[in-house]
Amino acid sequence: MSEIRFDGRVAVVTGAGGGLGREYALLLASRGCKVVVNDLGGAVDGTGAGTTAAEKVVQEIKDAGGEAVPNFDSVADWEGAQNIIKTAIDNYGKIDILINNAGILRDKSFLKMELEDYEKVIAVHLNGTFYCSKAAWPYMRENNYGRIVSAASAAGVYGNFGQANYGAAKMGIIGLMHVLKQEGAKYNIKANVIVPIAGTRMTATVLPPNLVEILKPEYVAPMVVWACSDRCEFSGYTFVAGAGYFSRTAFMEGPGVFFDPSQGITLEMIDENIDKIVSLEGARTFENATEQTGYALSKLNLG
Ligand code: NAI
């Protein structure tokens, strides 16, 4: 099997000063990609800022013979996001790959969560992903090439206690990528999602030390970097990776039941058929919203 290379490609990795983002940047650079290493350099809760984190990763890449430049802007700021992408354009003339990875945590039970904890987490994860993707989009469209991989989380896909803000932001990102899949299709822009499982400073406080060791970020990076390669023809996919486990998660819709609306639909009909309505046996995904609506209408004679 031929080696997967990124020679001539340019990537932006947000939040690449540590944890997962650093691994993505190192792997891309080791395969010939020029990388913008973005990191605001703050604490896990999003407070503070600094240049050291991004600078260190750039140095690591250079020491290994790769090419990289740092950027210290916040993804949560529209001007900042534009500047992150501009760093790629100014230094390397284009952007082929965007990994929306920057993230913070402000966990609290829903009852105790302050609006500020919600707004900050939405700002970094959801707005940051929207802003960076939007800033990169015209360049990718123009070049007829783009690979976007955005970080979601099992906390959104399946739910996690104390992460109402984070779960909402992460599912928003999946919705955004589903739409970018549609709008990017004509321009060879693939928009996918990663649900990582890794021991990083973000998870170190909740995971036991032996699990942090098993869940190395470097075990996630090959999936993400593959999705950034021209080998990836998938779009709108949500990949799962951690501890050597790789999979795909998706919204599935069961075959459901069809009633004739002209005969009237009652509460009791729902009640009598609820097991069939909720069954996921024979479930499938849909390519887009139109296809799903088409299925809902498929038993009707629309003349
Ligand atoms: P991390 O805390 O090690 O890395 C996140 C990086 O983002 C930090 O270096 C931080 O400085 C940077 N950052 C924060 N706000 C920023 C901003 N406004 N602009 C630019 N950079 C900013 O955490 P980790 O674990 O590496 O997380 C990476 C991504 O993966 C995050 O989006 C996280 O939500 C997601 N994730 C991680 C999981 C895990 O198991 N570690 C599980 C599910 C999702």
Image (tube, rainbow, N blue to C red):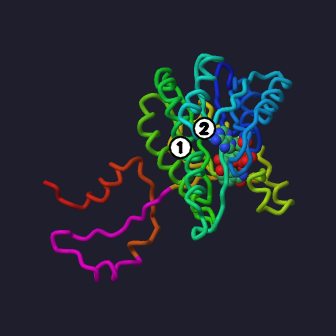
Q: Quadrant of the N terminus?
A: top right
Q: What percent of the width, then of the height, locates residue 82? A: 55, 29
Which residue is found at the position 68% from the left and 21% from the top? 7
The extreme left residue here reads 303
Q: Amino acid at mark 1?
A: Asn
| Helix, strand or loop status at disc 1 | helix
Q: Is residue 122 magenta?
A: no
Q: Is residue 22 left or right of residue 130?
A: right
Q: Amino acid at mark 2?
A: Val
Q: Is residue 82 visible?
A: yes
Callout 1 environment at 10 Å: few (<14), some (14 to 19), or many (20+)? Answer: many
Callouts 1 and 2 close, C-beta under 8 Å: yes
Q: Pointer 2: what residue?
A: 75
Instruction: Establish whether ligand 1 lies closer than 8 Å to the Cβ of label 2.
Output: yes
Q: Distance between the Cα atoms at labels 1 and 2?
A: 8 Å
Magenta residues span 251-275
Q: Is residue 196 visible?
A: no
Q: What percent of the width, then of the height, locates residue 79? A: 55, 31
Which residue is found at the position 49% from the left and 33% from the top? 134
User: Residue 72, relative to residue 217: is it above or below?
Assistant: above
Q: Pointer 1: what residue?
A: 127
Q: What percent of the width, then of the height, locates residue 170? A: 56, 52
